[in-house]
Amino acid sequence: MKFSKTLCAVGMMALAGFSGLAQAQWKPTKTVDVIVHTGPGGGNDLLARAVAQMLEKEKLLPVRMQVVNKPGGNGAVAAAAIAERKGDSHTIGFITSVWIANPLTTSEAKVTLHDLTPVARLLLEPAVFAVRADSPYKTLKDFIDAAKAKPGELKQSGGSVTSRDNIVRQQLQQHTGAKWAFVSFQGGGERLAALLGGHVDMMVIEPQEAGEQIRAGKLRVLAQIADTPLPGYPNTPTLKQAGFDIVATPQIRAVVAPPAIPKEALAYYEDLFNKLRQTASWKKYVADNQLEDSYAGGAELAKAIEAIEKDMRTQFQLAGMKLVR
Amino acid sequence: MNTFTRKGDFWAGLALAALGIYIVSQAWGWNYMTEEGPGPGFFPLWYGSVMVLLSLALVAGTVLKNDPKSQKVLRWSELRRAMTCWAALAVCVAIIKYVGFMISFGLLTWFIIAIMFKRPQKVALAYAIGGAVGFYALFSWGLELQLPVGTLF
Amino acid sequence: MDIFNGLMQGFSVALTPMNLGMCFLGCFLGTVVGVLPGLGPPATIAMLLPLTFKMDPTGAMIMLAGIYYGAKYGGSTTSILLNVPGETSSVVTCLDGYQMARNGRAGAALGISAIASFVAGTIGTVLLMLVAPPLAKLTLAFSAPEYFALMVLGLTMVVLLAGDSLTKALLSMMVGLWIASMGTDLFTATSRFTFGQTELLGGIEFVIVAIGIFAVGEVMSNMEPEKPLDMLPVPKGLKNLLPTWQDMKDCKYAFLNGSLIGFFIGILPGAGATISSFLSYGIEKSYSKHPEKFGTGVIEGVAAPEGANNADTAGAMVPLLTLGIPGSGTTAILLAALVLWGFKPGPLFIEESPALFWGLVASMYIGNVVLLILNLPLVALFAQLLKMPGYVMYPLILGVSIIGVYTSDSSIFQLSLLVLFGLVGYVMRKLDFPTAPLVLGLVLGDSMEKALRQALMMSQGHLSILFRPIPAVLLCIAAFLLIVPLFKKFNSARVQMIDAEA
C-alpha cells in the first residue's frame, strides 16, 4: 500500500513537473508567417527571407517560416494586417523606422506600433554622408560651410520627406543654421544616379550601396552615422568627431507581433532572435551587408520606439509638416 | 431638347465635369507651391481644370450638334446582359471572403454558362467544377500561390 | 579586355552543359511566369533566391536573367489571346494583338511577337556588349529634367492613340493622371485622393486597372448580344498560324524601332519597360502608311512594342552591370543576388568579374535563340486554345483576372477595385472613350509629376533647367510629333477644299 501511494505521489509530481515544463516551453506548431511591408525583393522582404533561411540552417525553428508580403501605404497595410491577427502566436512582422514615422503624418494609417507587441530589435542601419570624389568638399564641415554661404543652393538627394535622410538633414540644419535643398527620389538607384551624375551635391547613403562606388574612386565619404564605428571606414569621423554633437535618429529593423499574444509565445520569439544573433550565419550576414547588430528585447524595444517617435515629432514639426497624431 | 439627354456623351461629360470639380476642390486644400517647388496641389489643379474644360466642351458638343449619327445613344436593352454579367462578378468577389475562391468561381462559371449562355445544366456544372478544381490544382497546389480562402472553405 | 576575346570567354562559360541547362530552365520558367498574369519576374526571382545559394553563381545568374527576359516573351500570350496583359509592359500588345486574334490571326500575332522579341532581344544584347561602359555616362546624364521631357514625349503619344475624338482621348488621359496621383505624396507626405482608405495609400496598382479595363470590360462587352459570339475565329491553315513573309517585310521597321527604342529607354533607371512599348508603338504608328488601321489588328502594332520590351531588358542590364544601379524591381533583386553571392556590382564590375559579365552576355544570345525555339511551336498550341467555346473562355478570363490580381496583391479590397475598373472599362467602350490614353496617363502621370517637381527643386524654381540639351531635344521631338499629325490633317483638308473647288 505504501509503495503504491509513493508511486502515486511520484507520478503526480512528475506530472506536475512535466506540465510545468510544457508550459514554459511553448513552441510553434504550424508555419510561422512573417509579414513585411515591401513587395518581393524589397529591403525587409530580403531580410525576412534571409532570416528564414538562417533559422532553417541553424535548426532554431521547428516549423517553416513563410514570408507574407503586404505592401502599400509605407507600412500601413502591413500594420493593419498584423493587428487583424490578434492573439495569433504564429504571426510576426518585420518593421523599420518608417512604421514609426508614417502614422505621424498619415491619418489613414490607422494602426500604429503602439497597437502591436514589440518583440525584439535586431539591427541598426548605419549610413554615411557621401559626395562625389571630384567635389571640393573634403570634410562635412566644408559642406556645411558652403551651405551656409549659399543658403538653399546645395542639394541633397534622398528618399521621402519623412525618411532618415531628411531627418538627419533637419537635425544638422537646426544645429548649424545652414540650409540646403532636399530632392526626393523614389528609388535608391535614382538617388545614387543623381549624385553621380552631378545633379545633386550630397547624399546620405547606406555603406552597402556606396561601397563599390567608393572603391572605384567615384564617391568620397565625409562622415558616418553609426553607434559603433563601421569596420570598413576606420578613417571616417562620426558626426560627433566631425564636430557636430547631435545624435542622429536611428534607423532600426525590429520584430513585432500581433496584440494580445500569449506571454510564452512572446518569450519564445525574444529568445529565438537572441539565439539567432549568436550564430555564425547571422554574424556573416551582418558583416556582408555592413549593418550593425543591435539586439534588444521587447521591453527595451518599446522604449526605443518611444524615443524615436518623440524625436521624429520634434523634427517633423520643425520641418513644417502637419502631424495628424 | 430632350434628344440630347439620352446621349451617352452628355452624361459622360457631366460626370467628368463633376469629377474635375471634385479634383480641383481637393487640390485647393493642398499647397500649390512650396518654397521647394510645386506642392501636392499643383498637378491636380491643372489636370482637374483641364478636365472640367474638356468635359464641358463635350457636353456643349452634344447639345449643339444634334447629329444622331455622331453620338451614341444608350439603351437599357443593350446594357442589360452586360450589367447582369458584371453583377454576377461583383457577387462572386463579395462572397469570396466567406466561401473562398473555388466555390465562388464555380458559381460564377455555372451562372455564365447556364443562365447567360443558356447551355444545359450538365455542361454548366461540369465546367464549373472542372474550372474551379483546375485553377486550384494549377495555382494553389502546383505553384503554391495563395488563392483567396474564405472562412468556410 | 577587348570585345572579341571577352565574347569567346563568355561563350566558353555559357556553353558548359551545366550553364546551358540553367539557361534553358530560366527561359522556360520565365515564359511560364510571363504567361501568367499577376505573377512576375520579381516575385519569382525572390522566391528562388534561397535555392541559388547552393549553386554556382554564374549559372544562377544565367538562370535568373533567363527568367527576366523570358517573361517578356510569355507576356504577350495572354495579351493576344485573352486581352489580359500578362506583364505590365505587355499592355500595349493588347491593343492590336487581341484585335488580330479576333480577326482570326492569333497565330500570326503570337508568332510575330516571338520573332520580334528575338530580333530585338538579340540586337539589344549586341548593343549591351558593344557600348555598355560608354553608355554608363549617358545613364548618369539623365536626371529629373530629362525624365520629365521624356514623359512629356510619352504623353504626346495620346495624340497618336486618339482615334476619332481628341477630346475624349484627352479626358481619358486626365482620368489616368488622376488615378496615378492617388496615394501618399513622396515630397510632402500628404495623402491625395485616398478617400480615407488605408489600402489606397500606396496608390492603385497598374495591373488591376489594366486587367479590369481591358479584360473584364471586354468580357462584359461580349455578353451584350442575345446570343453571344460562341467562338473566336480559329486560325485555319498554316498561313494564319504563323506570320507570312509579307508580314515579316511589313515589320522590318518595327523590329528596328522596337530594338532601338527599347534598348535606349531601358538604360534609363527611371523609365520602365511600359514606357518603351508605348513610345515604340506610337512612333511606329506615326511613321506608318496606314496609321488609321492601328488598333484594329495591324501586325506592326504587335511587333514594335513586343520588340521594345525585350530590348528593354538588355538595356536595363547596362546600369546594373556598369554602375551597380538597378532600374526596376527585377534588376534590384538581381543586384541583391549578385551581392549575396559575393560579387561587387559597380563601376569595377566588368573589369573584375569578366567571366560573369561575358558569360551572362553570351547566355543572353543563347537564351534568345532558346526562347524562339520554345515559343514558336507553342504558338500552334496556344492558338488552338481559341477553339474553346465562348461560354468557357469568358469564365476562364474572369478567373485568370481574379487570380492575376490576387497574386500580385492579396486582398479583397484590390479585387473589388478590379470589379470597379471592369465596369469603368465597359462604360468607356460603350461611350467610345479610348482606353489606351487612360493607361498611358496612369503609367506616365506619377513619374512625370515627380520628375517635374524634382527638376524644379534642383533648379530652385527656375524653369530654365528644362532647357538643358537633352530635355530641350526631347521636348522638340514631342512638339514635332504633336504638330505633324495636325499638319497632315490641315493639309488633307486643304487638298479636299482644292478638289471641291476644281
Image (cartoon, coloured by chain):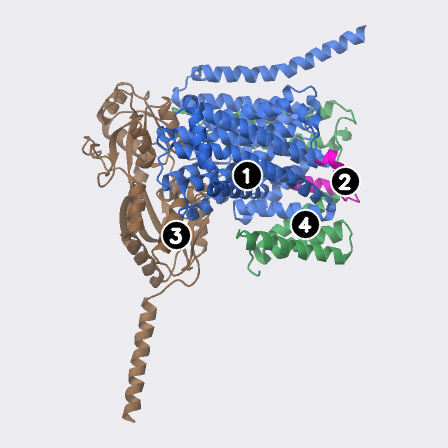
Which element is circle 4 on? helix
Which element is circle 2 on? helix
Between circles 3 and 2, the one closer to the viewer is 3
In this figure, what is the number of numbered marks? 4
Q: Is residue C165 left or right of residue A85?
A: right
Q: How far apart are marks 1 and 4 (CA)?
A: 32 Å
The picture's colour for chain C is blue
- CB within 8 Å, label 3 to label 2: no
List x then y, in percent, for residue A111. Answer: 42, 48
The picture's colour for chain B is green
Q: Residue B58 sits in which quadrant?
A: top right
List x then y, in percent, for residue C121. Answer: 54, 30
Q: Mark 2 points at which residue?
A: B78
Q: Which residue is drawn at 30% across and 45% down?
A: A286
**Marks 3 & 1 on one chain:** no
Q: How far apart are marks 4 and 3 (CA)?
A: 41 Å
The picture's colour for chain A is brown
Q: Distance between the residues labelled 4 and 2?
A: 17 Å
Report in which chain the residue with disc 4 lies.
B
The disc placed on residue B88 is: 4
| B111 versus A74 height, above or below | below
Q: Name the residue under label 3.
A: A52
The disc placed on residue C86 is: none
Q: Which residue is drawn at 76% across and 11% down?
A: C496
Q: How far apart are marks 1 and 2 (CA)?
A: 39 Å
Residue numbers of the magenta segment: C215-241
Q: How far apart are marks 3 and 1 (CA)?
A: 27 Å
Q: Is residue C231 magenta?
A: yes
Q: What residue type is labelled 3?
A: Ala
